[in-house]
Image (cartoon, helix red, strand yellow):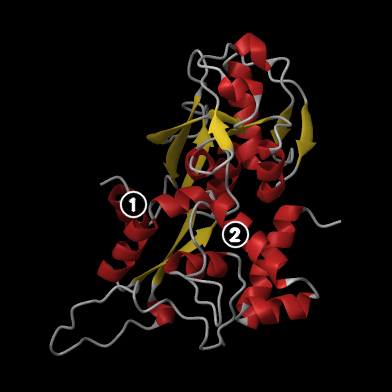
Amino acid sequence: MTTPSLRQLDIFAQMVASGSVVRCARDLDMDAEEVARDLASLELRLGYRLFENLTGDARLTPAGRKTAQAMTLLSQDEPESWRVDEAEAPVAEQPSPSPPPTPASSRETIILAAPAPVFGHFQDALTAFEAANEDVAITLDLTIHLADEAALALRQGKADIAYFYALGEVDGLHSRYGWSEQINLYAGTGHPLAQQDSVSFAQLALTPTLAMEPHNGLRRIIDEALMRGGVPLGAPVLETDNLFDIMTILREGAGCFAAFGPLARDLGRMSGIRRIALERPLPAIEIRQAVHPKGKAAADALAEFLFL
C-alpha cells in the first residue's frame, strides 16, 4: 500500500495535471474535501504553500513551481493554468534596450539538495540569485535529509550544494553550521502533561507517543537527538506521515509528538494543540551546508550568497 506521504505527492502530481481540486478529485475518484486535506497536510509537512488557493483554477506559488520541477512533475508542455500568481511574481526593472535572454541550453546548472523545509527557508534568496545571474539555473533535489545522504549525493556528483540535518559536525564531511531548530513536544490541550507548568523527562517515559514513519528523515534525526539528550520516550503507538491523522489524535489526547522547524511552529499555533512545558530544553537540530570540494564557481558563489 502506498504510504500517506507518497499518496500526497501523487495527489500533488495529479493537481498539476488536472488544474483544480474538483478535476483532481474526479480523476482520482476521491472526494474534493479529501484532496484539499491531503494537499494541506503536504504543505504543512513541507513548511510552505504550494498553491495560492484551491478554489477554481488553482495556481502554483513560486515555491510550488520549484517543488513540482524538483519532483519532475511538470513537463515542458505545461498547461497555461499552471502559472505563478501575478501578485507574487517578482517584477524586474526593464533596461533599455533589453538584452536577449540566455538560451536554456547554455545556462550553467547548479544542483541544490536540501530538505523541503530548508528550501522554504531560503526560496526568496534562490529566486533573487537566479534573477541576478541569468546564465545560472538552479535545480532542486528535495530527497536529501541527513549527512550520509548529503555525502553520497556530493560524492556521486548529484549535488553541488547540500543542506542536511545533523547534531553537530560530521566526520568525513566538511560542512558549516547554518542555524538550529529547537525540538519541542506537543500534545492536545486536554492532555495531562499539556496542563502542567513544568514536565520532567522522567514523566515522558510513561507517555504514549506519535511519530512519523521510521524511514522518514525527520523521524530519524529526531530519534537520534532525543536519544542523545537522554529523553526516555517509549515506543510510538502510531507511526504515520499523515499529519492530519497525527493532529487529530493529538487533539484527542492520545499521546505526544516531537517536531522542529516549520512543522513545530505551525503545531504551536493550532487550536487544540499545546507545546509541553519541559523542565529543560530538548536538543536542537542543526542545519548544515556542504559544498562539493571541486565545485563550480557559480555553486561556490551561491553557497556564500545563501549565508548573507
The residue that disc 2 covers is 40
Kind of residue at badge 1: Asp
Q: Is residue 156 visible?
A: no
Q: Is residue 175 above or below residue 157?
A: above
Examine the image and state in which quarter residue 238 appears: top right
- Label 2 environment density (alpha carbons within 10 Å; few <14, some 14–19, many ≥20): many
Q: Is residue 261 above or below residue 12?
A: above
- Provide residue 171's location: percent of width, then percent of height: 52, 27
Say left or right for 11 vs 153: right
Chain-order first, disc 2 or disc 1: 2
- Provide residue 101's location: percent of width, then percent of height: 31, 84
Of marks 2 and 1, the one in the foreground: 2
The residue that disc 1 covers is 300
Examine the image and state in which quarter residue 201 appears: top right
Q: Residue at x 18, y 78 (%)?
A: 93
Q: Is residue 257 above or below residue 271?
A: above
Say left or right for 211 vs 110: right
Labelled pair 2, 1 in contact (Cβ < 8 Å): no
Kind of residue at badge 2: Ala
Q: Which mark is residue 105?
A: none
Secondary element at image label 2: helix
The N terminus - image quarter: bottom right
Disc count in the image?
2
Q: Is residue 23 visible?
A: yes
- Provide residue 121's location: percent of width, then percent of height: 41, 50
Secondary element at image label 1: helix
Q: Marks 2 and 1, Cα distance to the nearest angstrom?
A: 35 Å
Say left or right for 292 vs 304: right
Q: 72 or 234, which lies in front? A: 234
Q: Residue at x 58, y 50 (%)?
A: 45
Residue at the far right: name it: 1
